[in-house]
Every structure is written in C-alpha cells, then in structure tokens.
Image (cartoon, rainbow, N blue to C red):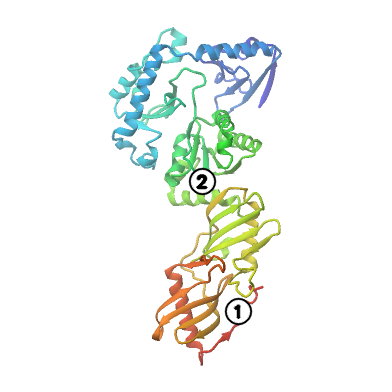
Amino acid sequence: MLTLKYANVEEALDMVNAQDRGRYFLCTCPECNKREAFIYKNNPNFLQCNRENNCGMSVVFEYEENKKVREWRSKYESEDGTLTPEQKKELVYISRLFKHIQYNTENETLDNYRGLSRKTTEPFVLDLKSEKIVKNMFQSAPNLFYSKKLYQEKNEKVNYAEMPEMIKRNIVFPIYGDDGLVDRVIMRSTIDPHISKKEVQLQVNPNPKAKDFFKDIPQGSKYVVITEAIIDGMTFREIDPEIGLYSMTGARKWRRVIEDIKAHKNELKDKIFIISTDKDKAGEESRKNIAAALEEEKLTYIHFTPDIEDVKDANEYLLRDRNEFIKAYQKAKHGMLIDKEFDLKNQNSDFVINRLYRDQKNGIVSLSITYEGLNIRGLSVDVNEQKINYPNESLSEERALFFGEKTESILKSISSKAPFNKDFTDIRLKENDNSIQKPINILKYHREGKFTKRIDFQIDDLVIKNVEVDSLPNDKDPLIFYPRETETKNKVIAATKEFNNRLLGSIRDYEKSLIKPQERNCNIGRNIER
C-alpha cells in the first residue's frame, strides 16, 4: 500500500488526472500509470487500481486540510444518497419482481447451475430466461438502469435495454439491503455463454451506502465462510447447508465485509470464519487483509485454499472433484486443531472426534469419540494439567476404559489448540481404509454360570474391561452389555452391529483355543493399562 500526501482533495485529483464519472473519478494509477484506477467521491482518501492481478495498487491520500475533506465526503454522501420518488417507485417494483421470480417461478436453467442444486441457489440467483424479459426489466426502471458512463460523456440517459450485450444477461444475482430492496445486481448470461465480459455489476440503488456484498448467516451456524464471489459462497452452502456466508463482489471489496463484521461482532464472536479467496495475486492480498482484520478483532478464523493444480477457487474445485472438495473442506475446518507431527495416515484406524467443546472457565475439553466402530462418551481433557479424565476413573476397580499413550497424546494436543466456547464436530483424523480391520484381542475371559461371560479386550490402542455377554443355552442370541457410568448409569460405550459381531467372533475363536474353559489372563495390553 502506498501513502501520498497532498494539501487538499483538489490537488490529489489533479495529480492523478481524475475524470468525473458520476459516483467516482477515473484516475491514472500512480504505480502502473494505467488509466484504470478509481476514487469514490464519498471516500477521497483512497485510490484503487482496478488491474487486480497486474497491479492492484492501493493508495492512501493524506491531506493537510482535513476539515475540507470531511465537508467533501459529507457533500457527496448527501447528494448521491437521495432517491427521487420515481427511483424509489422503480426500486420497489424491481425488488418485488426479483423476489417473485426467485421464489415463485421455475428456474430450470439454475438446476445444477455450476454444479449447484436449486435449493442452494434459490436465495441468491434468478433466471430472466430470455432477452425480451431482460429488456422489459431494464425498461421498467429507466431512472435506475442506464449507463452512468454514457451519461457523463453525452449527458443523456441511455437505458441498458438499448444495448444488445446487456439484454443477453439473463442470470441475475441480486444483493438486497437491510430494507429488503435491491442495492446491486451481478449479471451473467446463459443465453450467450461466449459473451465478451463474463460478469457485470450494476448499482441499482444510487445511495453510496448501498450494500456491495452478500450476507446470509443461518441461526445457529458455527462456521461462516468469506469468499471472493457469490458462486464460491454457494459452493460451500451446497456441501454444508448450515454454513453462513459473506461473499464479496471482487477481491478488493473486503473492507465493507469487515465493517459489517465489526458492526455485528457480538453476534459473530463465537463463529469460526473460513477465508476462501481465489488463488491469484488479488485473492492472496485480500486473504491477508481479511485475516489481519479478523486477528485484530480477536475472531477465530481458518484458511481454505484449493490444493490441486489448475483450480483457482472453490466452485472450480467442486466441479473438478466434488468428493475431494468435501474432504478438503472437512480438513480445513478441523486442521487448525490437528498437530502435523502426528503421522495419522499410518495408523490405519477409524478415529473420529464426534464432538469437542472447550469450557472457558476451567479449561476442560469434553470429547465424544468414534474409534474402530465404538462410540466412546464421557471423556474429557484437563488442558492445564495435560491429563485425560476417563469415566469412573475415581473408582479404580470400576474403570473400564484405557487409551494408549499415542492416542492420549493426540487428544491432548488437539484439545490444547481448541478455542474456548466453540463446538467442533466430526473431526476426522484420517480417511479410514475399510479393507483393513484391526484385530480384537481377548485379554481376560471369565464365565459366570451357564449363560454369562465377562471379558476384557483390546483393539489397536484401546482397552475395554468388564464387558458382559449374556446368551440363551448353547450361546444362542448373545447380547453384549458395555460398562456404564457408575453414578448416572449413562452409557459410556456404544458399538455398531458390525463391531459386536466381530467381537462375538473373536470370543468364539478364543474359546476354541482353550483346552478347558476357565478364567485366563493375558499379558497383551498391559502396556496400555496404567
């Protein structure tokens, strides 16, 4: 970022060869000397080069006459912010038209548009279907839909309906303000896929405070993604219907998003933000600026960047390989907690943390885990003491669950990285290879009468003790009862049907190996029990 000092606004405008274009000045960029920079009239302290991936320089102007700058800004905010009665009437009509088409008509071309379902796209995009309808839409709001550039050059309002390329833009992404009226639209075309400019943006509401970003955060969402374009925001919504989104209308438009986040900080302080910008120069700069702003506000954030070749954004990733995109999203959500020093890929274990929550008061992390077909509840980690708390641990003779040092180290490390007062779910530490099943080793076997057996067993890095197996005569219809929490009698361990069948098979194999059915202790697993 470059900082330049001038006596007043007029001097700065003269130095960059500013040309009045209505809401903004077209300027020569001080860095690349191309006439593609702009200064908004309501923000004369800032110049931006529009050549995002070639220059993209941001320039801050400092003025000696600050009072005159405030007067300048106030003047243009008041002048540009007033809607005429005709404009207000047209704005209401266009807003109603868009919402009717969005929610009450068939939008066949938007079914599987860019790999997205209509359920996902409905709140954000509509299809005007034909050039005739697009033309009628423009004609219905002549005081809103006219070329501002031609108005400055010729002093006449040329409606977009008279421009052949504009009436081919049937795909509309409306941005609604807090009052429910359209502030801005992004327009694309499926009528002519080879149209010269893929996307155009039109400011419908002339108010300089008109919203220039999309915002949709469902109540109760834990994650909020910030993307460079609404198509990328919808891409995340496609695979996670609960995710909230902020979508910019360009890599340089991040400031308004951050302003909104600051304004609603109390509502958003418990969210986890996912920053997903394009893999190019402009996107990288935007990503760093957003991260710095969130850091300053002490908000939690993580990064999502496509890690495959020739893919620059989230939607391209989805179209290239939906399954890999889903995996990458899950990895990004939970990667902030997983320590790279653990070689999890070589474990060949099905290890999923179903839920993790860190309490701010005492630093205790509550855990629920799926491990090799077993769901284990009631675990917690004391982060300060670096200690795993097991169910019934205070009653040493009743403790039924033991993890080895390898797994305990992973749980302690992940728990230490977890932010306070935030729920994490479905932290998948590796993709399970279903072709490899860890053996179940019987450590202790004891019969209690004719119909009851009591066993201890080990699978990989886990030992479970005091499991009861009851059956009818001749071991028919066996039922497995895992230990419960002593005081509440709540389940500590639950198993899938498949795991129970495997366990019963291991018990039968063990019984066959016995010369005489009797209580027998093994040394396997003693390195785990402590």
Image position, residue 139 (x, y; %): 33, 17
Q: Quadrant of the C terminus?
A: bottom right
What residue sits right under mark 2 in the picture? Answer: 309
Q: Secondary structure at mark 1?
A: loop
Q: Quadrant of the N terminus?
A: top right
Q: Secondary structure at mark 2?
A: loop
In this rendered view, identify the residue nearer to me: 259 or 331.
Answer: 259
What is the number of callouts on the image?
Answer: 2
Residue drawn at the location 56% of the way across and 38% of the way down:
268
Outermost residue, bottom direction?
Answer: 515
Q: Bin the neighbour count of mark 1 within 10 Å (Cα to Cα): few under 14, some 14-19, many 20 and up.
A: some
Query: Who comes first in sequence, dot 2 or dot 1?
Result: 2
Whether 427 is drawn above or below 525: the answer is above
Image position, residue 151 (x, y; %): 44, 11
Image position, residue 76 (x, y; %): 55, 13
Q: Quadrant of residue 429?
A: bottom right
In this rendered view, identify the residue nearer to me: 110 or 522.
Answer: 522
**What's the amino acid at mark 2?**
Glu
What residue sits right under mark 1 in the picture? Answer: 524
Image position, residue 317 (x, y; %): 46, 45
Q: Bin the neighbour count of mark 2 within 10 Å (Cα to Cα): few under 14, some 14-19, many 20 and up.
A: few
Q: Nearer the viewer, mark 2 or mark 1?
A: 1
Direction from residue 412 to residue 436 in the image, left or right: left
In this rendered view, identify the residue nearer to me: 229 or 527.
Answer: 527
**What's the amino acid at mark 1?**
Ile
State the CA–CA distance, disc 2 to disc 1: 47 Å
Residue drawn at the location 49% of the way across and 18% of the way down:
207
Question: Can the viewer see residue 182 in this picture?
Answer: yes
Whether 421 is drawn above or below 151: the answer is below
Residue 334 - label: none
Residue drawn at the location 64% of the way across and 39% of the way down:
298
In this rendered view, identify the residue nearer to me: 281 or 43.
Answer: 43
